[in-house]
Amino acid sequence: MRNLSAIAVAAFLLLSCNQKKATTQKKPDPSSKKGAPTIASKVKGCKKIPGLFTLYQDTAKGNAYLVINKNQLDQEFIYFAYTENGVIQAGHHRGSYRDNQIFRIRKRYDDIEFVKENTSFYFDSSSALYRSKDANISESILISEDIIARDRDSLFLISADKVFLSEALSRVKPPQLPGAGLHFSLGGLNPKKTRYSAIRSYKTNTDVVVEYVYDNPNAFISGGQEVTDPRSVSIKYQHSFMAVPENNFVPRKDDPRIGFFNEQVNDMTSYSATPYRDVIHRWNLVKKNPDQALSEPVKPITWWIENTTPVKYRETIRKAALKWNIAFEKAGFKNAIEVKIQPDTAEWDAGDIEYNVLRWTSSPNPPFGGYGPSFVNPRTGEILGADIMLEFVFLTNRLNQFDAFTTAGINGFDNGEEGEEAQLGIHNPHQCAIGAHIQHNTQLGMAAIKSLGHNDPIREEFIEQAIHYLILHEMGHTLGLMHNMKASNIWLPSEIDNTDKTREIGLIGSVMDYPAININPQHKNQGDFYTTRPGPYDLWAIEYAYSPSLDDPAKEEARLNSILARSTDPLLTFGNDADDMRAPGKGIDPRVMIFDISGDAVTYSAERIRMLNAIIPKLQDEYTTEGEGYQELLQAYLTVSTEISRATSIMSRYIGGVYVERSVVGQEGAKTPYTPVPADYQKKAMRELNALLFAPDAFDASEGLYKYLQKQRRGFNFFVNTEDPKVYERVENIQAQVLSHILHFNTLNRVTNSELYGNTYSVAEIMKDLETGLFDADMNGSVNTFRMNSQKMYVEALIAISTGKIKDRYNTISQAAAYSTLRSIQAKLKAAGNRGNLNTQAHRAYLYYTIGMALDKN
């Protein structure tokens, strides 16, 4: 019986296994059956588009098919995507670079998969750890599509629609931040409306342009005039597949002393404390004559000026772009940059990735004045193509992203990165606001030129220098250079207008900075407004990136290190966006700051404010025209007051600041990594802020203008907000930017920490000096409304530090100093009694009550 039972069980298990196998076995590929459709029969009536990848498009219905060659399986390709056209509110603008990644195609049974490769890690193949190279690293299968036809197992056909007309390859619709509040957003992707705009395929790349249409039937927010109807919004988006270049390009290592965009790679088999194999972005330049010290390249970096460019500026742009050849000569190349003009009869489109194009647009709500990204081979850092986008607003007399009396209007684009990417903590390395900054500077410069009596030739020179600088900066990005926000301090105020020096070396150390426009209050001594050539840092950086490699690895390592060893030269100083102090509490080195200039930024900024205060009373005469409204006067006032805000912010960064030096141990000329700003200089900054920002007469220069600051009426544009000028709120924002930085927990905690290595300007002294500047001058009389507001802001900040919800962010020293300062202010308010007008008496009584309620209840 036992044997019979065993035989029965075995038979049952075998039957079950066979049944399971029959139900789970992959269905055979239908195209392998006799009479199954061939590729030819499937694409009958379609237009063939041969190239790197062959596509077929149905000429009647528009749908498309993609052919995968057997030789393309398990091979790496480069994927690149960019926005050909879009709307700013939806996170897209013309020329916006998006994804840039490596992918490979693989066949699984009768499916074709597109797999995104992870290029962030390196494993030495000689290490035993190499066997674990795939551990805990997830691959991303972006697409898996059925093979719908094949030819002899060498060609496979899949639907291109499911690859390109979806968001499988690239996220087109920006991610939504939970709890971000009401804002314009794209609706759902409409597959019926979404369609191909163009399909192009060449030997080394295939481009597919898709018009994505997003429907939002219940759209609540209109999105502005550029959104025709928020219920249906189109984004034109290009997908490009590229062959991995087959050449002798040698990756070059990144180094913290110099600033290039890079590909970050961690060596997972290294024992080093910094196991980095990061490589910089650079073009593949090869000498025609390797034995010559100076040689033309085999293939120069060729730029085309788009035929949309205003004709009158084309030659200026060409000359500016060619100035980069000065830097390439340091690397051993002659005529490395070529510039041509796109003919009006050109059959190629400026969006074709085969061409590097200086492009122009005139957008309703321009996101930049200039923008210069590039795309690369992520494995090596080799730059494969680039564009420079330029906005016409840069040359016009209108405010970019104009909003008259808001923080945004004051900041003048200080925020740099805005929107959902910033809120999500995503850094866009291509983001650049230099054009918007120069456009602000253009308006400021014209106001100064008019008010200081400069003649027409000076104005023309000013505009030409501005264009030069914009092109130099954006082209620098396309060469691989990231921002250098520390480069604007190479000259002292007494030297900065000496053109014998500045035209030989540069007005600033690098064109990759965001410098203030150089304006001399004594117009007869005016030097250059902008630098018009690559600076010493730029020449050094290009030499490092582009000088030809030596064949011997050891000699090449020594050669590159000898170039990097020069980083201690003050003319080669470097600090990028991650280090800069544009936002309150951000960064630590005040020299790494946007919108500053000169090696004595406090003196220069204070002189700047005094000059602007002298200009403001002249604005009405210069910016009012009979028969017209006051819009131009309003814009001039906004521009000048924004510049005052920038200058005060720059000075505030020296309070609690720490100078940072990046050099390696044993490097000749190396300085201590961290050195606190000398106490005397911090106190100088505080004195100037008290005199020019917080003093009772700080804003007297503008008094006569307020009743004329009228925004031009258009239809119902005052329906939501009243039109009266909100001067009080504007000044409040200017003062708040400074107080929020000085009293930021990062700043005050750093003040205490830096006392351990040299700082002698304590938190208590800082708060006492602010108290003196904000309260003492008018304790025996009336307080004006600007001072009332700044006094209230200061008191509220001290309460927050000492007893508020955020007090735990501050150390004990800051909490105690805030408490002591509040008690001192309370005593002053009590001693003032009933001095001053009724507003002043009410204000002081309120502050006294506020302090008492905060301190006495704790």
Image: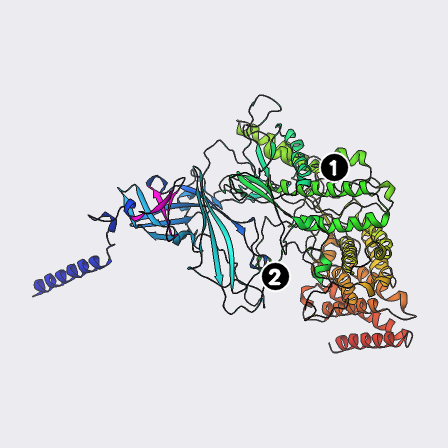
Q: How many marks?
A: 2
What's drawn in magenta, residue-wise?
Answer: 42-69
Measured as percent of width and height from the top left, residue 177 is found at 55, 63
Residue type at the position of mark 1: Gly
Height in image: 142 above or below 151?
Answer: below
Q: Looking at this view, is 207 or 242 the one in front?
A: 207
Quadrant location of the C terminus in the rendered image: bottom right
Measured as percent of width and height from the top left, residue 809 is found at 67, 64
Quadrant location of the N terminus in the rendered image: bottom left
Q: Disc 1 marks which residue?
A: 506
Specify the quadrant of the image occupied by residue 570: top right
Q: CA distance from mark 2 to mark 1?
A: 42 Å
Please tell me which of labels 2 and 1 falls first in the chain. 2
Q: Disc 2 marks which residue?
A: 225
Q: Looking at this view, is 823 or 211 the one in front?
A: 211
Q: Secondary structure under badge 2?
A: loop
Q: Decide whether residue 132 is among the magenta residues.
A: no
Q: Decide if residue 747 is in sight here.
A: no
Residue type at the position of mark 2: Gln
Height in image: 833 above or below 453?
Answer: below
